[in-house]
Image (cartoon, rainbow, N blue to C red):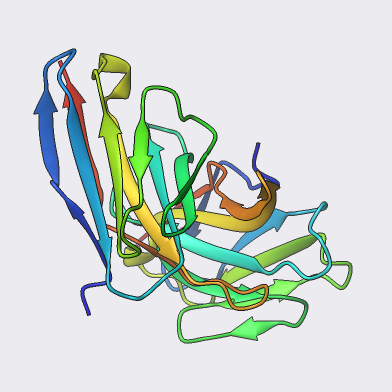
Amino acid sequence: DAKTTQPTSMDCAEGRAANLPCNHSTISGNEYVYWYRQIHSQGPQYIIHGLKNNETNEMASLIITEDRKSSTLILPHATLRDTAVYYCIVRELSGGSYIPTFGRGTSLIVHP
Amino acid sequence: NAGVTQTPKFRVLKTGQSMTLLCAQDMNHEYMYWYRQDPGMGLRLIHYSVGEGTTAKGEVPDGYNVSRLKKQNFLLGLESAAPSQTSVYFCASSYLQGATYGYTFGSGTRLTVV
């Protein structure tokens, strides 16, 4: 099972900030949190990643709690094109290698 | 750069037929992965490879085989296709630098087994 927990679905009004939470309470000390999104049935696309400090890029901001057990992806001004499934990913040990594992993600619907 | 390329993009198979899905990456990534995605589900890992000549089982490996003879290619084989293998298949590759990894996906292969 994935080591992350995300709400199944969320909605947001266009132009508003979308805040997508993720719990990763078993994350190890040196593991990064990655966020990807999947639009329709395309391949998932990278959004942002972080370790312990808050991160920002042209797409989004990532807020990681001080204990690193949870994080929030922020889309500051959501548009209709941000409607997608958002995945929060941490790696877990599998067969001697650390492998990223996807859960079911959060389906974000941005409405006019 | 093309990134991760999957071929074919679509395929219809009859039950019992075999086929191979090809994944090619031009980023010199060490790690490669095959996932399947069913409606309403997340991505489930089938097999993965941490380097040329090595493969390992993921979460749902039954009915599939893989090979990584060249670093840039990762093949997924279905020896005897079953309707339960109807799915969208995604290939991905990643580098590894310390604890960070870039993860690039292909555009998917839609497989229908009738």
**x, y (%) of residue B51?**
47, 60
> Quadrant of the image for the N terminus of chain B?
bottom left
Q: Toward which corner of the image does residue B106 lie, by quadrant?
A: bottom left
Name above or below for residue A101 compared with residue B96.
above
Residues B33 and A96: in front is A96
Name above or below for residue B13 compared with residue A35.
above
Q: Which residue lies at the image location 82% right of the left edge and 53% below the top edge? A: A25
> Quadrant of the image for the C terminus of chain B?
top left
Q: Toward which corner of the image does residue B47 lie, by quadrant?
A: top left
**x, y (%) of residue B60?**
49, 29
Residue A91 visible somewhere in the drawing = yes
Total of numbered circles in the picture? 0
A83 displayed left or right of A69: left
**x, y (%) of residue A70?**
77, 60
A12 displayed left or right of A56: left
Q: Which residue lies at the image location 59% right of the left edge and 57% below the top edge? A: A88
Q: Which residue lies at the image location 64% right of the left edge and 48% below the top edge? A: A6
Q: Which residue lies at the image location 35% right of the left edge and 52% below the top edge? A: B68
Direction right: furthest residue:
A67
Residues A71 and B34: in front is B34
Residue A44 visible somewhere in the drawing = no
**x, y (%) of residue B110?**
20, 38
Name above or below for residue A94 compared with residue B94.
above
